[in-house]
Image (tube, helix red, strand yellow):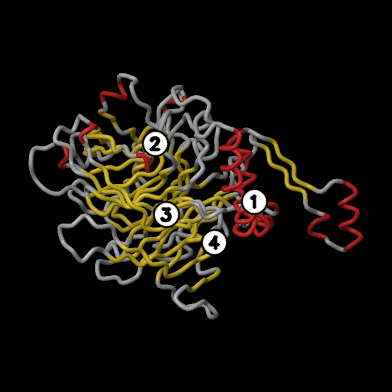
Amino acid sequence: MLWLAYVVKESRFVANLPFHLFPPNLPAQFVHLPHAGSSGERLEAFTARSDPSGPLARRLAYCEDAVHLPASDGARGNALVLVSCDPQRRRWNTVMAPLADPHGGQGALWVVDALGRDDELVHQVELEWAALERGEVEFHPLGIALVPPVGGGDDADDGVRLFAVNHGAARSTIEVFSLSPVSPSPHRPLGHRATHLFTLSHPSLSGAPNSIAPLSRTSFLVSHDHRHTRRRRSLVGRLANFVETVGALPYGRVDYVAFDEPVARKDAQEVVVRTSTVARGISFANGLALSPGRETLVVASTSRRQLLFYDVRASSSLGEDVPPTLTLRRTVTLPILVDNLSLLPSSPNSTSLTVLAAGHPSYPALLSAAHGLSLRLRLPGPLREWAATLGARDWEEWDVRLRADEQRGMSWAVAVRDPPLSRSAGGEEGHEEEREAWETVYQSSGRIAEGGFGGSTTAVAGVSAAAGEERAWLVVVGLYEEGVRSVRQ
């Protein structure tokens, strides 16, 4: 009874009902590039795809996270984006279900060139992972993050360090790779190889890790979206997961993870992992974004449609493995179920940051796309007549129709500046809440017939040199889309 009272007290189910029942009427596509020189600038939008003739398991499909990939010299002047995808998502999804078949196929990593030629837009990353090749492990990636190389040497880990959340069949782990170009050349910028170094395994990581924000090559912050996961196959476990999700209960958290480099990198048992929770009480903790100076951490709270801005205070004791201290400073409410986050590029001396948050404007539309459902939401006849009598026109005309063969979810990405240009009044002391402190970057109804792009999970934007001029670009990935949506000047 005490747990039920807590659920009733903390649940946001009733508060979220209008959002779920009345999806927005979005255009086929709307784009506003944050770095474009003029709002009247001509934009080119298209879907970058892999070879459609191959089987789905080998195609660029059903992607989750995306990060800007630095050039081989460490610069960010290119327009390369690393994307995590899983064509098996309709059969294995530990967040939205089903958990039917984790062995039917593997996920993959892809490189997308937002400013590339039509014949050089996407390229699958070569995975060097002996255990995966032998069928001993599964690879179903979610969040990914990169750490620049540390310098010279002949070691395999002199490349970019890549962290990848992996939701395997039995448990979740963090996979550590070394990512490097294959025959680095300006004429072949997309070819990359990810060499698997070792696996980070820990009881605290086995459930619902989602997104990663690196602090160094041996430490990072990781979000956990649920306490009660779908891996618990019992009726009680499934019910607990459903209540936590629908009620937007604050059971998610952010953990600090540190580890020692293994003596023999091929022996995962030698990796010593230490974890501690640095932020708790977050409803569906999802995407993370850490400012370049590591003084601000932004956390996406999916089910409460919020961005949480934390001040980060690192340990003052150099050389000690001490977790940072996080203090909530700001909350921004958004019109979407926020998924993953990225940061817009800024000047080295900038004291502000702009967060690009992508997510889902309609949960029923996403469910329809995920499970192949045809949904119709409306009041029964007698209740519609009653609504008409009472003059409740919204409820009288409420009629939402969703077909999986017509749409693949909706897309919406927004930009949020921190600190804001103007502050809202009335916030509580030490915790300011703002509404509409954002601007739309990308929208789409996701309708196939209209050329829409649905299920947006991540948006990455930048400005890069191409053909002797600076050009703004945007890449959006969709959870149940084939290919990625690319927009460029």
Percent x, y of residue 129: 27, 27
Percent x, y of residue 463: 33, 57
What residue is disc 3 on? 341
What residue is disc 2 on? 172
Density class for disc 1 (Cα within 10 Å; few <14, some 14-19, many ≥20) is few
Going by the numbered disc 4, the residue's amino acid type is Leu
User: Height in image: 449 above or below 41?
Assistant: above
Q: Which mark is residue 334?
A: 4
Upstream in sequence: badge 2 or badge 3: 2
Mark 1 or 3: in front is: 1
What residue is disc 1 on? 1
The span from disc 1 to disc 4 (Cα, nearest Å) is 33 Å
Q: Which mark is residue 310?
A: none
Looking at the rendered structure, the secondary structure element under dot 4 is loop
Going by the numbered disc 3, the residue's amino acid type is Leu
Q: Residue at x 57, y 48 (%)?
A: 244
Looking at the rendered structure, the secondary structure element under dot 3 is strand
Going by the numbered disc 2, the residue's amino acid type is Ser
User: Height in image: 287 above or below 268?
Assistant: below
Upstream in sequence: badge 2 or badge 4: 2
Mark 2 or 3: in front is: 2
Upstream in sequence: badge 1 or badge 3: 1
Q: Residue at x 87, y 63 (%)?
A: 391
Density class for disc 4 (Cα within 10 Å; few <14, some 14-19, many ≥20) is many
